[in-house]
Amino acid sequence: MLTPQKKDFSQWYNDVVLQAGLADYSPVRGCMIIKPYGYAIWENIQKNMDAEIKKLGAQNVYFPLFIPEKFLKKEAEHVKGFAPQVAWVTHGGNKKLQERLAIRPTSETIMYDVFRDWIHSYRDLPLKINQWANIVRWEMRPRLFLRTLEFLWQEGHTAHATEKEADKMAMSVLKMYRDFVENYLGIYCVSGKKTEAEKFAGANYTLAIEALMKDGKALQMGTSHQLGQGFAKSFNIQFLDEKSKKNYVWQTSWGVSTRTIGGIVMAHGDDKGLVLPPRIAAYQVVIIPISTENNIKNYISKIEKNLAKKQIRFYTDWQNQTPGWKFHEWELKGTPLRIEIGPKEVKENKITFVMRDELKRQIVSLKQFKPEKLLDEIQKRLFEKSKKFTIENTRKAKSYDEFKKILHEKGGFVKTHWCGNEKCEEKIKADTKATIRCIVSEKSGKCIKCGKEGKFEVLFAKAY
Amino acid sequence: MLTPQKKDFSQWYNDVVLQAGLADYSPVRGCMIIKPYGYAIWENIQKNMDAEIKKLGAQNVYFPLFIPEKFLKKEAEHVKGFAPQVAWVTHGGNKKLQERLAIRPTSETIMYDVFRDWIHSYRDLPLKINQWANIVRWEMRPRLFLRTLEFLWQEGHTAHATEKEADKMAMSVLKMYRDFVENYLGIYCVSGKKTEAEKFAGANYTLAIEALMKDGKALQMGTSHQLGQGFAKSFNIQFLDEKSKKNYVWQTSWGVSTRTIGGIVMAHGDDKGLVLPPRIAAYQVVIIPISTENNIKNYISKIEKNLAKKQIRFYTDWQNQTPGWKFHEWELKGTPLRIEIGPKEVKENKITFVMRDELKRQIVSLKQFKPEKLLDEIQKRLFEKSKKFTIENTRKAKSYDEFKKILHEKGGFVKTHWCGNEKCEEKIKADTKATIRCIVSEKSGKCIKCGKEGKFEVLFAKAY
């Protein structure tokens, strides 16, 4: 039923998202329906990341969906970047509005207009807030999870007294995002600064984590922006410092969205379907009864109690279908650990299990069965595999011809030097469709395009 | 600083919501900003109610914010009820849309258009989903939490094979809502059916829980609608039953919103500010250091460890302010239990505490201090007080004159008979501003307005 990855990765992706029940197309062009199986993953991401966000000292809030047009226009770069993607509300309650309202494409402007009233003195700083919300950006070529007109995300916003503190905050968030994606989603990340061409509209600079998908294309998994004082000046957010001198605040904003679910699909999935990392899987364990005799039911109920006690998320599939059908179904759905219980297991007091990433059938005694350890193993293995894949698919190029050849034939990351000139960046994009995913270090070398000495070591890749 | 309740309850409400930091006005007319202290309450409501919703067998999903105009028009009653309140998106990505999109005022239509594809056979039933989302209804007279253009809620939607199952579902949800509001929010509820005039646009019938606020007005805290087969027919949602016969499904929908936070404020608050029920309070305990010597810090740190171990949400206020200022502040913020630690407490190994609802200072030995018990006591006391208040303010009237007099002078609920004629209902509303909050039973008696024999025993009240 699934298109093989090698044949058409993009079609494989759509097949697996739809068939595994993560999401569905909606009657509204470009919007998607996140189905229970997909939403459960988002709930697990939310719950765990929310705890990390709170550790960084941010408190959750909720700001309006609507942004008055004049607010969006206050920061020149920002409006240039977002205006083309905005959905506009022009009528409400049967009346034409005096000023049309943007549906938030991001919330800097609606939040910072209020920051002006919330911040007066250095005692009010740092101010750290976060919100879990829906966002609308009018995309021309929508793709389930990866690029939809509406998506869900968290957006953090902070204000600080000094540039140094804002730098530190942006970096702490980047580290939190990277740890989260690596430890929870099992996806290896590279990280660094974005170039001027790729940074957030209105930011001083943007930090990002990027991960390699199985087709060799990169996916941006999260961004953390140091906003400088640009918004503070546009919205007049000033504070009195300890010497009673007025200063503009330094700000950051940062976000991770439902797009990460697309990343999970493409970083771990195979021709049989999803492979979900245990820490965020909807169900960590699925139990398949081979038959439905009473002694099998009792045996399974004992296993269920044990799983519940260990707070393992599980599902027992009692549907009126063959075991073979169910194996196939739960492989498609990517449940990390499958338990099969038939008369033989009951008789011998054993458990047959299959780990989704390895698909080898194993038998152990009930006593020796440690599901929490197996789930940990899978979690680690997925990360190691993702790391190995990324390292193997990060290449160096000696010439521009080789650079183009790698991107054309193999994909992946190409680590190279860049002079810093936007024209070289543009030409490379035109030639190869690859963009600079991030600047990994400031290290001198010859620009792969123009040959001039440049100070940036960068990672190029084609990206989603 | 706070307007006394007796002087102007409505002004007291705005004062306390703003001064306690629950919410703020937003630059967008009629929308509000839910601030950290208010959002924490919503998070506690969400977390606990979500578990109850899952116990009813519903799974979380996310559907698009946008609803094509033609969908909204499919169910005649529904569109009549909601069209006047809709916000319309007419432009996206710099282009005029071919069909304008409504921002969801509720999600029946966008969901049920897909239910048609999800439901084929009786095996697909019951279908139970829920979403936590933002909703937009263009209100003419917005009030913080109670009536805002945008609010947050959960909306559950189910489809069943039979009318009986839909009835049962609607009733189970009502019971869950009532238990939740009583046990978590500490607010006593009355419940019953709405009249035809007051039911949800498109429902067969609506069940509701209603609670009495301290000014004697009622607040609807949650509704559960049995939708019959109206939407199923409009959206053609049919299933094959066990005899392979095609049938339309029977449906329910139900919701609780951020409005409940307004209910918490008005059901428990007093002239000193909020009084928060411990189970949903942002902080359950606040610790006020009377001074900042090291031995006080150490003593407090011991208390903090104990609270953390018991998973009690607490906050220690080390701000550079006087203890008196802090007592006032945390009384305004309604924290259930306040601990005061000064040299005396440290020396005698004691704890001074004040429960927000009673405001009596008590001293116990550290060993005898059982915060979890005190919090339980407060939770129960708030509910008992709310119950007593509701019962004391539920009156009977012998004549229409007495009925009007009670509503005019005392407010509260008036329990009376009603003939079932909408004209009597309308006239009573015109005379008194009171509406039928719910039908409590079908019991014969003379209509308070027209004197004719009627079968409905109802509760009238002025309402928010």
Image: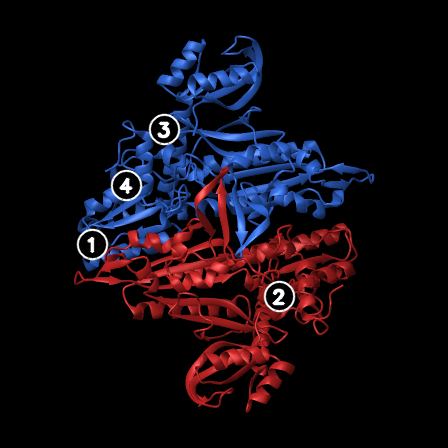
Chain colours: A red, B blue
Label drawn at residue A292: none
Badge 3 amino acid: Lys
The crowd level at tag 2 (other Cα within 10 Å; few <14, some 14-19, many 20+) is: many
For the view shown, which residue lies furthest in the right direction? B243
CB atoms at circles 3 and 4 under 8 Å apart?
A: no
Residue for badge 3: B214
A333 relative to B180 in the view: left or right: right
For residue B202, above or below residue A417: above
To the question of a shared chain for discs 2 and 3, the answer is no
Chain for numbered disc 4: B
For label 2, the residue is A265
Which mark sits nearer the N-terminus, 3 or 4?
3
Tell me if residue B63 can be seen: no
CA gap, disc 2 and disc 1: 51 Å
Q: Residue B349: where, in percent of width, then height?
A: 24, 50
Q: Amino acid at mark 1?
A: Asn
Pointer 2 indicates a residue of which chain? Answer: A
Choose between A463 and B378: the one closer to the eye.
Answer: A463
Q: Where does the N terminus of chain A fall, quadrant-wise? A: bottom right
Mark sitting on residue B331: 4
**Mark nearer the viewer, 3 or 4:** 3
- Contact flag, marks 4 and 2 (Cβ < 8 Å): no
Q: Secondary structure at mark 1?
A: loop
Residue B320, numbered label: 1
The answer to whether B432 appears left or right of B89 in the picture is left
